[in-house]
Amino acid sequence: ISSGEPVMVREMPLLGKHESVIVAGVPDTVLFYEGSPIFLFEHKFPSRQIPFRHNHVQARLCCYLLQLMGWETRKLKYVLVIAPPECRGDKDLRRIPSYVLRQPSETRLRVKLQAGDANLYLNDYDAAEAIDELNWALGFWMGDRPATPTTKKGKCKSCRFNEKCDHSLASHLDTLDRHAG
């Protein structure tokens, strides 16, 4: 990294202290150039080919961790790589940074992989937004605010805390489904 040459680091553990809390993250790939991170890549393989808000939150948090670790982040962008589930493990995923480097000012790119097409969403890193999101989450985990219930049954159903949560829609799903049918 210190050589200034382009270096791609995969699954680099990141660690930082935000106020009194130690925060950790592991992005899929960070591309360094001239000794600084310029692109952070997060690969997602959902059935719906759009980035969700939590994907942005995760990527921004990893960018913030790079900042907390002392890296220069003024030029840092993050890229959400959204590909179909069958593209997981596709060797062509490793070529994605080269596509982004050729068109760094684009906000959306489409790339053909062996197993399907990937959509790339390029975003500027906004430290203030990352800090606001982290503070919001920490508000719950530090006991400063109650949980904010979701209205999405699917989120409740897949949550590992749904049986303990007073707001869970999942524990009531079977009852609701029986009455709806």
Image (cartoon, helix red, strand yellow):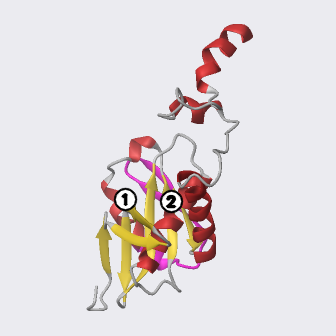
Is the Cβ of the residue at disc 2 closer than 8 Å to that at disc 1? no
Q: Residue at x 42, y 64 (%)?
A: 23
On the image, numbered disc 2 is attached to which residue? 58
Q: Give how far across and how far down residue 70 sits, in percent.
A: 40, 84
Amino acid at the residue labelled 2: Gln
Segment colored magenta: 98-118
**Hey, which quadrant is residue 99 in on the image?**
bottom left
Callout 2: SS: helix
Q: Give how far across and how far down residue 179 sits, in percent.
A: 72, 8
Q: Residue at x 49, y 83 (%)?
A: 73
Q: Along the line of sight, which residue is nearer the eye, 53 or 67?
A: 67
- Would you say residue 51 is visible in this rendering? no
Amino acid at the residue labelled 1: Leu
Q: Residue at x 59, y 74 (%)?
A: 106
Does label 2 or label 1 sit earlier along the sequence? 2
Q: Along the line of sight, which residue is nearer the eye, 115 or 159?
A: 159
Residue 151 in the image: above or below residue 5: above
Rendered image: mark on residue 93: 1
Rendered image: mark on residue 138: none
- In this view, the residue farthest toward the front is 143
Label 1 packing within 10 angstroms: few (<14), some (14-19), many (20+): some
